[in-house]
Every structure is written in C-alpha cells, then in structure tokens.
Amino acid sequence: MEVTAAQGGIAEAVRSRPEADRWVWRSTAEVYPRLLAAGVRVERAYDIEAAEALLLGHEGRSGAPRSLAAAWARLRGLPVPEDPPPRAAGGQPSLFEPGPPPLPPGADPLEALLAVYAEQLVRTEAAEHPDRMRLLTTAESAGMLIAAEMRRAGVPWSAERHRELLDELLGERYPGGLEPQRLVELADEVSRAFGTRVRPDLPAEVVKAFARAGIALGSTRAWELERIDHPAVEPLLRYKKLYRLHTAHGWAWLQSWVREGRFRPEYLPGGTVSGRWTTNGGGALQIPKVVRRAVVADPGWRLVVADADQMEPRVLAAISRDPGLMEVAGSGRDLYATLSDRAFSGRRELAKLALLGAVYGQTSGDGLKHLAALRRRFPAAVAYVDDAARAGEEGRLVRTWLGRTCPPVGGAEEPADEAGLPREQEEPSYGSTASARARGRFTRNFVVQGSAADWALLMLAALRRSLSGAGLRAEIVFFQHDEVIVHCPQEEAEAVREAIAEAGETAGRIAFGPTPVRFPLTMAAVECYADAK
C-alpha cells in the first residue's frame, strides 16, 4: 500500500502507519531531516520534485521548474512559478532563504500532491523504456533518503588530528589572517628565485615573473610548471599545494564544518547532469589524501571503505552488450590487464588509455591507432559511444541506460575524466563545427558516466536496505562517485564487507539485467580513512 504525507504532523503520520509500503511527499530534503531529528526512519519514499526533474529532462524540458507548485500549475494550465534560486555553493543555510513557491490560493496540498503523483506515473509509463524510468525515479528517491541520513550521521572527524596535520604541514599560525609560517617561507623562496618580490598566490604575477625570465606560460597549472626548468618551480609547486590545503581545509574550514566529532555536509543527489552527486559547502567530495588522516572511526568502530573497480569500462560493457567486452568485464581479473592480453600485447597502460580514450573522445595521435584496435576487438562497445557522440553533435537527446537525459544544449557540466585526459570545462553551445564536436565528446562520455552514476545509486539503495534488514548499527557516512564509506562497530565489519559486495552485484543485475559483467569493489576495514589507500 502506498500512502502520502502532506504538510503538517508528518512524524506522527509516519509513526502511525508503519505498514506503509512507500511514502509520497514533495521533497525529501525538506521533510526527512525533520523525521530523522524526531527519531523516525523511513524505508521507502517517493520524491515528487526529484521525479519531476527526471521526467522533465526525459521529455526534453530540462531546466523547467520542478517544484510541486510548478508541476501542479502545468497540470492545470496555470502560470508556472519559477523555482527559487539555488543556494550559493559553499554557503550555509540562511534564515531568510526563499522556500518553495506556494500553491495557488485555495489549492489543497494533498489533492495537488496526489494529482501530480498520478500524472508522473502516467508520464513514466510513456517514457522510452518505462521499466527503466520507473527504476530511475525509485533510485533517485532512495538517494535522497540516503543523502539526508548521511548528513545526519556525519563523517567521523578528529579535530585534534586535523589541527596536528595543519601544524605539521603549515607551521605556526600568525594573527590577523596572515598566511602561516610555511607559506611565508615558500613565498620568500619563490621571490628569491626570481630576484624580485612575487606573490605566488597571484597567478598573473607569477606569469609575468616567468616572462621576465624569458619563459612564456599560459597559466600556472602544475602540469605546465613541471615542463620548465627554473629554480622557482619547486617551491612554487609546494606553495600551491599547501596554499590549497590552507584555504580549502585549513583552520577556518575546521572551525566552520566540524562539530562534535562529525563533518556534516549537505549532499545533493543528481547535482550534475550526469547524475553524480555534489555537495553544498565543505568540499566533501574533494577531501585531499593528507586530510583523510583526520577521518577517524569512533573507538571500537571501523570505517569500511569500498571502491568500485574500473566501474566505467564495466558499465560500457553492460550497456553496449558487446560480447567480447562483457567477457573481459566478467572474467574476475583486472579488467585492463585482461584487455591488454587480448589487444595490446600485455601493455596494461595502453589498454587503459585506449578504452578511456574511446569513452572520453581522445582519438588524436596514437589514440587513433588504439581506437582501431578496440574497434576490431569490441565493435559494439565502440559503436555505442560513437552513436552517443553523433547524437550529441546533431543536437538530439542522449540518455543513460535507465533514462537520465542530457539536455540537447546549454550549460551542462562536463563529466570528470578518470584518466586525467584533457576535457572541455563546460558544455559547448551550437554555432560551429568545433562546438558540435565538443558536444559529441560530452555525450560520448555522458552515456557511460551517467549510467555508472545510476548503478551507484542502486548500489547505495541495496546496501542501505541490507544493513537495515540485518539489524546492524552500521551507517553509510560518505559517498562519492564510485566510493562508499560505512562506519560500523568492529565486530560488524565483515558483515558490512559482505553487504557491500552483494550490493554491487545486485545493482548490476537490477540496472542492466542478466549479463556476465561483474561489479567488484575493493574494500578495507580501517580505523583511519588515510589507511585505506
């Protein structure tokens, strides 16, 4: 039985209906934190606004207002209110932050909720693949529940260890907001190397200083600096690394974000067009390796850290249905090593670059030769991403396996590149052959990375259900792209490892159907996050 929760008394309503199969509400982000604060946990829920965003995208209307009020207005042929502006990244919630647009005067909230929900079910059945779209909306709603629970649980964080590593790496703090001791020393080294005072935190000054030394630079990015021979390079690179630590995870960050031994960022499921999560503030998805020394389990507890192994190539095998690549992805061995034995004379690094280059559109130079080898061995896999690229170039809608849709033009975030290959910084607009090709590179990767994000959602949902069903005290406390961390009592660590492994295979089976492709995860049960790598 499905029941709905309207505006008031939600905690009491949920407590009084424990037999409910699924709760339907406007926004998990608004409702569920209040339930968790009241000690109420919900097994399943349907998020109207998350589903609306997916359905609008599938219908070619990405970016249209997604609120309950907007969906109700579209249903009734009324003027559609705009969504409130998103909160600035990094900002803490404001007391005067605008809420969702209200329903028209006289509209009954429960009636509107039920009507929009019923219409969404009809639109889901009209999707290109209704079963997959149904699964996607269910998974996205589950992700919203998990995000709220992760924020409530928080990442175990030792402020003492964090301060120790800052003191160790940055040295003495100076009053008045001045840079710490080690940054001052490195800045002096850089200036001595140039023979004049240069502020290494100002890229324009650094570029001019190198120009005076007869060295032309386009930027101060590390890869560009590493190509040149000058005594300022070594201290400048060290400065940049420590400056990033100081500004992104220094003492000010620690004071702002860590409370009572926990770091609690606000997770935003589906925060990018590919479905990958983002966070609103705190930089949770970019925790440097050195800062991971501060992520420490509670006494008697462990952090079970799990990474999906070579997820995107495995997803490509599953969605392309390429027989040869599915066999490689189901062999139980390292995927790139197996691939290198088949097509690259045992050279694993070439096999990895070739496969990821095909996914990311890096097909110039030696890439053309590698792509030809892949095409001979795995024609269906290469054709799959080629077709996605062609659709993007032609301005057509491009979808993940489950139906998450990349809009045809405008403002989408370029998927990150696992191999560190060059990429566009934002989705290009139409208007030239070059921008169409760039759009094609974007959609080539989107179908793989987006389908991988869908798999990850299902893996998290399966893991959450397994942990709860087993009555464990374990909690999912962190997730980014292909990595999940579960905080659990030491005696539960082995059960958690088994649950994670099973969740990975369950997600692959549910998302992609029966294929030989396996989705293994590398796991470690550690006291400190830094020890898992």
Image (cartoon, grey):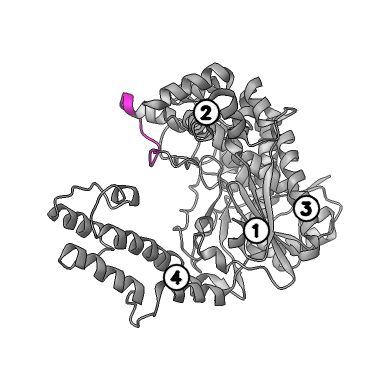
Instruction: Report how far apart the C-alphas of labels 1 and 4 lie in the structure.
Output: 26 Å
SS class, disc 2: strand
Mark 3, other Cα within 10 Å: few <14 / some 14–19 / many ≥20: some
x and y, in percent, of residue 129 in the image: 66, 26
Q: Which residues are magenta?
A: 422-434
Identity, as a three-letter code, of the amino acid under mark 3:
Glu
Labelled disc at residue 398: 2
Instruction: Report how far apart the C-alphas of labels 4 and 2 lie in the structure.
Output: 41 Å
Instruction: Report how far apart the C-alphas of labels 1 and 2 lie in the structure.
Output: 30 Å
Q: Main secondary structure of the magenta part?
A: loop
Identity, as a three-letter code, of the amino acid under mark 4:
Gly
Q: Residue at x 50, y 37 (%)?
A: 62
Residue of label 3: 43
Q: Quadrant of the C terminus?
A: bottom right
SS class, disc 4: loop
**Which of these two is toward me, 438 or 179?**
179
